[in-house]
């Protein structure tokens, strides 16, 4: 009888584990499907065909490199944005543009697809950051800190940071959120409420001002870096800046959809020899997902 070596022994002899190279034209379409599945529209008549399309794309992988596939996906996502434009998040628009970019790239000859996808990715990041910066600079309610002041008082995603930096308890912030909800939906209970008084803190104004101008500075910097003519040195700076933006911004406000989309665009705009940066964007994508975990609740469970 022939003795077989254990699986782990054979794997050890094969050498250390190596990360496979990320190939944008092969891997980005599949990662896009994963992203879109986590952000599928709520309307059943749009959600059902999208999920069906994604299932077919996973089974028939050759479909993911067909422009027709991404044109249909972009059309369905665009219909979602059009029908819910008053409540659609900004990144839902970016999903549509990205699917159209995939459609356009895959409609080109094979040798031109990578360059076209990289250019589209870079311009999507640059224009997204430019328009965000222009909007903020043109909005008085943003520049005076009112936007972040209100969000710090009422947004549950910012509650851990606000509590840590200002000393406001989580119970007080939860009470603020309850009062806001009462303003929005009190009529359902037969209540007519014209105003409520949210609990504030002097430190909160200081925090809101710094969050306001930091956001303008980092988004404006990214706009300049990604719209600047492409050069080797600036490529390194822009990748480092985008990863820094993701690691810091989504720690404070874990908006997974927008964060993942930016990381996919970051992978897409990398040059063919920038394998390390692509892996860094993949790691950042995982990090953004980790930011969505209820760390406070987990720590409380462990303490018990």
Image (spheres, rainbow, N blue to C red):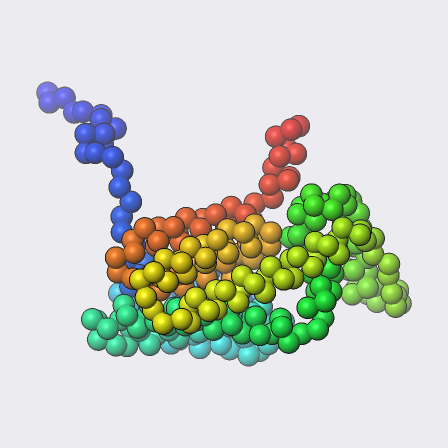
**Depth check: 200 or 170 in front?**
200
Which residue is outermost to the left?
A: 1
The residue positioned 44% from the left and 77% from the top of the image is 75
Residue 198 sits in which quadrant? bottom right
What x and y, as percent, mark residue 294? 60, 44
Vertical arrangement, residue 77 with respect to residue 270, above or below? below
Res 94 seen here: no
What x and y, as percent, mark residue 69? 34, 72
Which residue is outermost to the front?
A: 233
Q: Quadrant of the N terminus?
A: top left
Q: How many marks?
A: 0
**Depth check: 256 or 206 in front?**
206
The residue positioned 87% from the left and 65% from the top of the image is 195
Vertical arrangement, residue 112 with respect to residue 207, above or below? below
Describe residue 100's horizontal placement relative to residue 297 as left or right: left
The residue positioned 23% from the left and 29% from the top of the image is 12
Q: Quadrant of the C terminus?
A: top right
Vertical arrangement, residue 295 with respect to residue 254, above or below? above
The residue positioned 70% from the left and 49% from the top of the image is 162
Res 83 seen here: yes
What x and y, as percent, mark residue 149? 73, 59
Residue 217 sits in which quadrant? bottom right
What x and y, as percent, mark residue 181? 77, 60
Vertical arrangement, residue 10 with respect to residue 178, above or below? above
């Amino acid at each position: 009888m022939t003795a077989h070596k254990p699986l782990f022994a054979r794997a050890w002899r094969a050498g250390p584990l190596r990360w496979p190279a990320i190939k944008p034209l092969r891997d980005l379409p599949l990662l896009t499907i994963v992203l879109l599945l986590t952000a599928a529209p709520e309307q059943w008549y749009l959600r059902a065909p999208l999920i069906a399309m994604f299932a077919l794309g996973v089974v028939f992988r050759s479909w993911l490199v067909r422009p027709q596939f991404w044109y249909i996906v972009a059309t369905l996502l665009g219909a979602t944005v059009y029908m819910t434009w008053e409540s659609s998040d900004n990144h839902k628009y970016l999903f549509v543009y990205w699917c159209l970019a995939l459609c356009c790239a895959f409609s080109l000859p094979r040798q031109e697809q990578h360059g076209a996808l990289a250019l589209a990715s870079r311009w999507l990041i640059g224009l997204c950051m430019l328009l965000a910066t222009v909007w903020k600079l043109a909005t008085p309610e943003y520049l005076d800190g009112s936007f972040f002041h209100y969000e710090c008082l009422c947004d549950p995603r910012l509650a851990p940071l606000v509590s840590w930096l200002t000393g406001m308890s989580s119970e007080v912030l939860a009470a603020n959120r309850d009062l806001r909800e009462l303003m929005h939906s009190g009529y359902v209970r037969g209540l007519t409420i014209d105003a409520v008084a949210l609990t504030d803190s002097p430190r909160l104004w200081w925090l809101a001002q710094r969050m306001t101008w930091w956001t303008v500075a980092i988004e404006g910097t990214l706009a300049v870096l990604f719209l600047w003519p492409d050069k080797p040195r600036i490529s390194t700076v822009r990748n480092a800046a985008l990863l820094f933006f993701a690691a810091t911004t989504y720690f404070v406000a874990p908006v997974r959809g927008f964060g993942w989309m930016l990381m996919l665009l970051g992978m897409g705009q990398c040059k063919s020899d920038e394998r390390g940066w692509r892996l860094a964007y993949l790691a950042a994508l995982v990090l953004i997902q980790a930011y969505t975990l209820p760390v406070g609740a987990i720590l409380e469970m462990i303490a018990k």
